[in-house]
Amino acid sequence: MKRIAMICIALGGAAAGASVLAADAWPSKPVRMIVPYVAGGNADIQARYIAERLSEALAMQFVVDNRGGANGMIGLELAARSPADGYTILLVANTFTVSPSLFSKVPYDTVKDFQPVTLIGETPELFIGTGAVAANSVKELIALAKSRPGQLNYGSTGHGSPSHMAGALFDYMTGAKLVHVPYKGMQASNLAVISGEIQLGFPSLTSVIQHVKAGKLKAFAITSKSRSSLAPAIPTMAEAGVPGYEASIWNGILVPTGTPKDIVQRLHETIVQTLKTPQAQERYANVGAEIRYNSPDEFRKLIVAEMEKWRKVIRATGIRVDQP
């Protein structure tokens, strides 16, 4: 028995040593960063910046691979089925935590198939309205909506999109009963509000702030937990009268479950170091994003909490999309 114990200890030590050696040697070939969204969007911009910095810091190319479609599920399934060897990493947005409740089936397990690494950023949305809306604050808008149930509408970039879920959360927390009108993309949705085709919207801050400053749109509140440095005079939704409301667009990095812990740790440390630089602050500010990072365990807790939050909202509001 003593001999068996000694062998087990030796094998454990050898395995740990092999893990350290693997991390020291990593990366020895290009790393693929799967982005399950189309090129050019906010998530893609953040992904490409992180890939550039990782390539420089680790002296190996990190290649962005856009696999958009099916509300991100095409790219997510690809990542979940990839080898857990450190040569596939994945960027996700908060819609990652929405899909399991929104669709009848997803081709991966949101919690079990992925190992969180860290958040990398947050982009606030802006609750806007046309000048014709007879309300100048969130509280006035809630009162107006309740006096005219089903008569106020808001646009989104599609079913299950961040702008759709921001509106659904608003309905859930206030009982406003706004009517959802999906569009194919942010530009189309924003133009619909600007033209008066629809009354309200929850677009990204940077996509409409110039129209707010020009007086073409009303800005009721920011959807994030804290005010934005790009528009510090605009209150958060919580400050404006909906305590606990938070629906910003966050992005983070995951790897397939089973990726060696030392590689996860090295990846985490390198990304966080990158995000702490003045260059990162400037780059993020230019696209209206706020830098965010956390530990792998903290990120996992956020994912689980967000999944439960959106499950409640989707169940209560009756949202369902059988096909992405």
Image: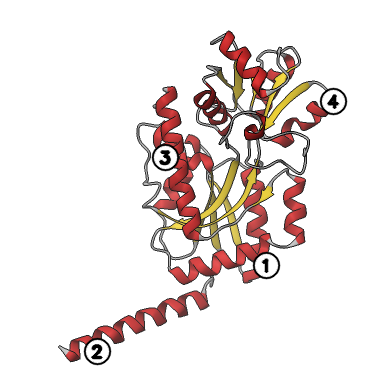
Find out whether the residues at labels 4 and 3 contact each other: C-beta distance under 8 Å. no
Q: CA gap, disc 4 to disc 2?
A: 75 Å
The CA distance from mark 2 to mark 1 is: 43 Å
Do residues under tags 3 and 1 come within 8 Å of each other at their CB atoms?
Answer: no
Which residue carries the number 1 mark?
56
Q: Which numbered dot is residue 308?
A: 3
When the figure is inspected, residue 83 is found, relative to residue 181, above or below; the finding is: below
Mark 4 packing: few (<14 Cα in 10 Å), some, or many (20+)?
few
Q: Residues within 10 Å of mark 3 (few under 14, many from 20)?
A: some
Q: Gap between marks 3 and 1, in whole Å? A: 38 Å
Q: Which of label 3 and label 2 is nearer to you? A: 3
The residue type indicated by label 2 comes to Met
Q: Nearer the viewer, residue 287 or 212?
A: 212
- Amino acid marked by disc 3: Glu
Question: Which mark, by number, is residue 214?
Answer: 4
Position of residue 142 relative to residue 73, above or below, is above
Residue neighbourhood size for the residue with mark 2, other residues' Cα within 10 Å, grouped as few (<14), some (14–19), many (≥20): few
Q: Which residue is mark 2?
A: 6
